[in-house]
Amino acid sequence: MEDEPIFTVKNRGFRYGDALFESIRVVNGKACFLEDHFKRLKKGMETLKMKPGGNISFNDLKEQIEKLIEKNHLIKGGRIRLSVFRSAEGLYAPINQRKSYVIEAKPFDDNKYVMNEKGLIIDTFNELRRSRNPLSQIKTTNSIPNVLAGIYQTENDLDECIMLNDLGRIVETISSNIFLYKNHNIYTPALDEGCMDGVMRKQILTIAKEMNINVFEGMLNGSMLLQADEMFLTNAIRGIQWVGAYRQKRYFNKATKEILDRLNELVSV
């Protein structure tokens, strides 16, 4: 149950952010891109030196997710949050390698990925920069930069905020990877720029190549935002959202819609 107590104040995820999570979309009652989520979770566990084995098996996690989807009657759209945390006691250094996990499942309004009717209005969050290190590519529960950016977003009546790395280059937004489109080319920050190794990012790069769209992973700056014809954001839950405006710049969404159609074909198989 959602309100059932599952840990105490000694929990390391609560005390130190010593935890990882994955947000997984459900379409037609099936968890999407589960293998890619597990790959990133494994990468995150290795980065945080959570030794494999013990009471966590990826086969068991898959089975538990499928059982929870069935139990919660998610026959169409839904979302899963899988959290893994070290459950050992200790201060900064845990006294053993015990791990625990929590799986949450909720219905989602749309069964397929749906394009937002109104383009997002976004701007840049400059108050805190993202570091370029291995932690930036995994989903830990230590998300204070995103929390502060979210507060800035609310205070400035925005739909999303662009976050910058320590060199002042574009990394991603609060909850999504970022893509620019112009002249049959797609541009997105490389992983070593400090962006999340997004599961949906991976799907979009594959789809773009299948559509013979040229893909460039590298550095993004403000001038590139102003030169692009389209900008869209991606994450595992929402899929693709198109950006309508960045400051005075306005964007179209023709190519974005075509990529979204391919994405829905992929998850409906």
Image (cartoon, rainbow, N blue to C red):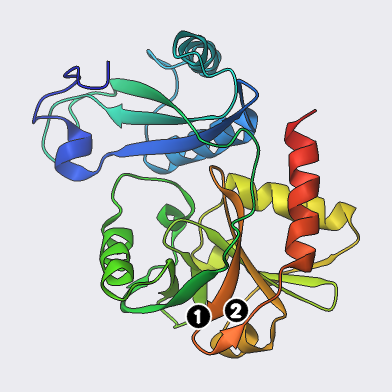
Mark 1 secondary-structure assignment? loop
* Above or below, comparing residue 17 to residue 231 in the picture: above
Which residue sits at x=38%, y=69%?
130
Horizontal and vertical percent position of residue 127: 28, 79
Mark 2 secondary-structure assignment? loop
Q: Amino acid at mark 2?
A: Leu
Which residue sits at x=51%, y=76%?
170
* Above or below, comparing residue 94 to residue 54 in the picture: below
* Above or below, comparing residue 179 to residue 58 in the picture: below
On the image, numbered disc 1 is attached to which residue? 169
Which residue sits at x=52%, y=34%?
24
Q: How dense is the environment of label 1, judged by Cα within 10 Å: few (below 14), some, or many (20 and up)? A: some
Q: Nearer the viewer, residue 229 or 102?
A: 229
Q: Is residue 93 visible?
A: no
User: CB atoms at circles 2 and 1 under 8 Å apart?
Assistant: yes
Q: How dense is the environment of label 2, judged by Cα within 10 Å: few (below 14), some, or many (20 and up)? A: many
Q: Is residue 113 left or right of residue 245?
A: right
Rendered image: mark on residue 220 = 2
Quadrant where the N terminus lies? top left
Q: Is residue 21 left or right of residue 113?
A: left
Which residue sits at x=17%, y=38%?
14
Quadrant where the C terminus lies? top right
Q: Amino acid at mark 1?
A: Arg
Q: Nearer the N terminus, badge 2 or badge 1?
A: 1
* Above or below, comparing residue 262 to residue 54 in the picture: below
Q: How many marks?
A: 2
Q: Nearer the viewer, residue 74 or 98?
A: 74
Q: Is residue 103 visible?
A: yes
- Please identify the quarter of the rendering in which residue 131 is found: bottom left
Rendered image: mark on residue 40 = none
Horizontal and vertical percent position of residue 112: 65, 37
Horizontal and vertical percent position of residue 68: 46, 13
